[in-house]
């Protein structure tokens, strides 16, 4: 199927900028054993039994070669206190793992410190969709951190929820 561009691509992009999303970080190791990672807003639960999660990414992203080749990733859920690390992992690839905001975890994978939760998973499927990919991960283990207000991404900015609706 050939990609179809909407008549008003700007409206499509703006519609999704207005859709608030939770913020996560995905980390892995590249073929040389170096940590790679990125900030993601496309994380979703796929099923509870077996425990499956999905995320999407562009196959042109700097982290794609590692995700395309690795067996395991770590999915990190972020709270408001993690805004700085979310920004760091969305910045320049060479700077993402400079500092003490992470440590080696299970399988030597990079685990971001002080997140609300993290889960190690085995990649079970990679579905290419045009220039992107949907990644399916079966969760194997993880841990909960201190609870926090959720970190949201909306209109290219980070927010925390306000009053109850």
Image: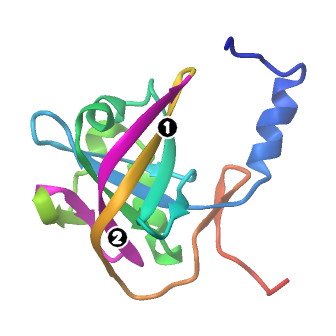
What label does residue 118 carry, if any?
Answer: 2
Work out whether residue 136 or residue 13 is closer to the camera in this orientation and state it. Answer: 136
Instruction: Indicate the quadrant where residue 103 lies.
Output: bottom left
Viewed as shown, does residue 113 lie left or right of 151? left
* Neighbourhood count class around disc 2 (C-alpha, 10 Å): few under 14, some 14–19, many 20 upward: many
* Pointer 1 residue: 57
Viewed as shown, does residue 68 lie left or right of 85? left
Lower position in the chain sequence, tag 1 or tag 2: 1
Residue at position x 35%, y 83% in the image: 144
Q: Badges 1 and 2: C-beta atoms under 8 Å apart?
A: no
Residue at position x 70%, y 77% in the image: 161
Residue at position x 57%, y 53% in the image: 41
Residue at position x 47%, y 32% in the image: 127
Image label count: 2
Vertically, is 90 above or below 165? above
Picture coordinates of residue 134, whole percent (x, y):
50, 39
Query: Which quadrant of the figure contains the C terminus?
Result: bottom right
Query: Which quadrant of the figure contains the N terminus?
Result: top right
Viewed as shown, does residue 89 lie left or right of 14? left
* Neighbourhood count class around disc 1 (C-alpha, 10 Å): few under 14, some 14–19, many 20 upward: many
């Amino acid at each position: 199927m050939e990609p179809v561009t909407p008549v008003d691509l700007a409206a499509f992009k703006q519609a999704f900028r207005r859709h608030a999303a939770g913020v996560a970080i995905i980390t892995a190791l590249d073929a040389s054993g170096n940590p790679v990672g990125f900030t993601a807003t496309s994380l979703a639960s796929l099923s509870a039994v077996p425990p499956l999660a999905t995320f999407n990414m562009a196959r042109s992203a700097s982290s794609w070669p590692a995700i395309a080749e690795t067996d395991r990733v770590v999915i990190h859920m972020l709270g408001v206190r993690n805004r700085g690390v979310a920004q760091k992992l969305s910045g320049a690839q060479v700077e993402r793992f400079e500092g003490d905001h992470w440590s080696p975890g299970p399988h030597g994978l990079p685990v971001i410190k002080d997140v609300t939760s993290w889960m190690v998973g085995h990649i079970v499927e990679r579905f290419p969709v045009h220039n992107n990919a949907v990644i399916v991960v079966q969760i194997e283990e993880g841990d909960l951190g201190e609870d926090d207000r959720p970190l949201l991404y909306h209109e290219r900015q980070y927010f925390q929820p306000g009053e109850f609706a």
